[in-house]
Amino acid sequence: MSYVIKCFECGAEIGNEMLDACPGCGGLLNVEMDLSRMRGRAPSDLCTRPMGVWRYAPFLPVPAEKAVTIQEGGTPLYDCRALAKELGLARLHVKYEGANPTGSFKDRGMTVGVSKAVQLGCKVVGCASTGNTSASLAAYAAKAGLGCVVLLPSGKVALGKLAQAMFYGAKVISIDGNFDDALNVVRQLAREGHLYLLNSINPFRPEGQKTIAFEILDQLELEVPDAIVLPVGNAANIWAVYKGLTEWRELGWIDRMPRLIGVQATGSNPISAAFKAGKEDFVPVDHPETVATAIRIGNPASGRKALKAIYETKGLATEVTDEEILAAQRLLGKREGVGVEPASAASVAGVVRLRQEGLVSRDEKVVCICTGNLLKDPDTVIKNAGQVLRAGASLDEVKRLVLG
Ligand SMILES: *Cc1c(COP(=O)(O)O)cnc(C)c1O
Ligand SMILES: [Zn+2]
């Protein structure tokens, strides 16, 4: 459970746990766990705790006794046979993160991040958010009894997410600007000491999120999939998954890495563009647009980490249109009974496209991480679903519709 925080860019060791960037070079921070206590042990040694984030406590930078938890993680891994057949794939699993307490994978990072905030003695936590981060932080702050401030881009937050942030009692501030603008402001608030920042640049959050990888491996009984596909917005989650896989690889618990495939929306595609140009750095997109609001981010804070994760696993980044995203969302619902929000469906849309392009082959075993619940964004669902039929309250009228 011991660890050091290091700068991702210059390697400097960081002594101050309150920081969200390297004081020397401004680079991203990264937690390096000391895994020596786990050497010579096996994943089955972790089975003393139920499925969920804290089952993996030896890999987390906060002791389980100090956890602020509402039982996050332990989400289903669906074996989607009908969809696999339709896409022409050997195997397709969906890791359904919509089953988390607030309906997205953000809860995995927040249980660790808020536990750390409590340990550090912070009284107020805050974030900028496209919606899910604020919903999750508001819930965990409530559980921990902390003050909570969330900054949201005005008019662009899905209804369910806004409702959650308001419901759990956060101070909700709507910013005239996009997510990238909101993040800039909240980082300054953190620097001035007004709050503890819990965006995914907080080095402790990916530590919780990496348990998605551990769970997938556990649920597949340590059979490593050929590819893990996920949507990329601010780009910390693909890094977190990479980090989890790397830790188990280092322990010899798995013998190879899956390809990591990041999917973006065409209107919000800095990582996909950088990958296509073969670059390790990206050019921000000024006015990101997509129906998948959770990945409507032009200047991904963890973009350089994401590109490293992709290159190191011989993975790739791609992009899909809003139409492809909505079609994949419907397909997943119709074939598998799984309801996800648009950003989550980007992973499935990415697989559809990559199969057509031949960049994922027929014999591959693929896991899509579906990051958030369908009910996060009911407006988009209703706008794109069929009509509701209307009838008077009479048997005849209803029967005509039922039989029609
Ligand atoms: C946050 C989020 C993403 C993007 O994750 P990043 O770590 O920002 O790349 C994707 N889908 C959903 C539903 C999210 O809430
Ligand atoms: Zn540095």
Image (tube, grey):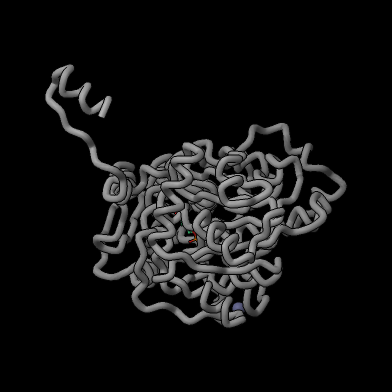
Q: How many marks?
A: 0
**Camera-side residue of 43 and 291:** 291
The quadrant where residue 8 appears: bottom right
**Camera-side residue of 3 and 252:** 252
Residue visible at 66% across and 76% down? 12
The quadrant where residue 392 appears: top left
Q: Is residue 118 above or below residue 242?
A: above
Residue visible at 39% across and 68% down? 183
Left or right side of 373 for 394: left
The quadrant where residue 126 appears: bottom left
Left or right side of 88 for 58: right
List x then y, in percent, for residue 230.
55, 57
Q: Quadrant of the C terminus?
A: top left
Left or right side of 63 for 120: left
List x then y, in percent, for residue 3.
69, 58
Q: Is residue 252 above or below residue 234?
A: above
Residue visible at 20% across and 25% down? 400
